[in-house]
Image (spheres, helix red, strand yellow):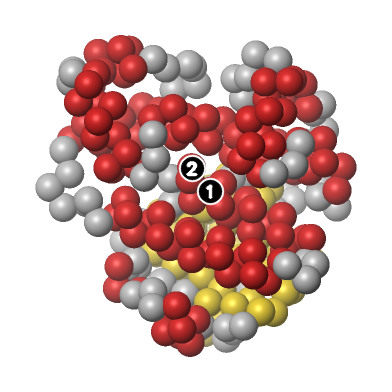
Amino acid sequence: MQKLTQGEFYGTHYEKLVLDNCIITDTEYTHERVDWHYHENPYFTYLLEGKLFESNKKESYYLDAGSLLFHNWQDAHYNIKPPQYTRGFHIELDANWFDNYGVDTTNFEGSFAVQNPVVKSLMNNVFVESKTNDIYAKLSIETLVLDIFDSMKKTSSYKVNRPSWVSNLREFIHEENCDFSLRSLSDVLQIHPTHLSRDFSRYFGTTLGNYVRLIKLNKAFSLLLTSKLSVTEVGYQCGFYDQSHFTKHFKQVYGFPPKQLQRQISRR
């Protein structure tokens, strides 16, 4: 079985940013199929554009733009790519990185899909910082990656004895493309709205309103990055009622307006 060493991914690297014990790559996937292989270090794969099928020994994933996977070290998998342009963003971290920051990899076993929109919004910010690459980018990226693991740990720590409504709610929110109210969600789950409001952040790492808003903003980020839609059209597709409303919330999360992302960090 093929072993990929540090900084090595199948495809063509647009950019490779080497930091302390961390390598970030922006890669076009060029292989229609990559047979079973594993990587020397743990890493994230964030699909920026296109589609990809990935399978490991436990699960299989049909990925599209905006999908995020975490692979713990030496976890074997294979990939199949449809005949279309496909681009991925990777953050690879070696053993020294985990030791230096006291992050325990046993909290994140195997390979798994990350759905938490808080984590995805942090990953979007890592992507932006990697493109900015000024004198402050290294510090920002280090902080953001630590925040990613902290957010993942907070939600994973409640997997044991987690009530059934948590999984049902996550599936409903991610699959239904509509506006939600506390009452409508509590009716679907058949639990009291006060109970839902009080316990949501315990299992999801943020408030209900912010969770739903970040799902919309992460979708918008992906569309701005890869599509030719206008800012107004992107905002409308993602459930914002006008451009100013969309711009306000986008800037609150990412620190800059959506037009700036579309202008400076769009598809090559």
Residue 227, by quadrant, is: top right
Q: Which residue is mark 2?
A: 117
Q: Amino acid at mark 2?
A: Pro
At x 71%, y 66%, the residue is 137
Say above or below: 85 vs 177.
below
* Mark 1 surroundings: few (<14), some (14-19) or many (≥20) residues within 10 A: many
Numbered tag placed on residue 136 in the rendering: none
At x 64%, y 70%, the residue is 139
Which of the pair 211/71 is nearer the observer?
211
Residue 252 in sight here: yes
At x 87%, y 42%, the residue is 263
Q: Which residue is mark 1?
A: 120
Please give left or right for residue 1 compared with residue 17 in the image: left
- Tag 1–tag 2 contact (CB < 8 Å): yes
Coordinates of residue 5 in the picture (x, y in percent): 57, 86
Which of the pair 234/138 is nearer the observer?
138
Please give left or right for residue 22 compared with residue 83 in the image: left
* Mark 2 surroundings: few (<14), some (14-19) or many (≥20) residues within 10 A: many
Q: Secondary structure at mark 1?
A: helix
Q: Secondary structure at mark 2?
A: helix
Say above or below: 133 vs 261.
below
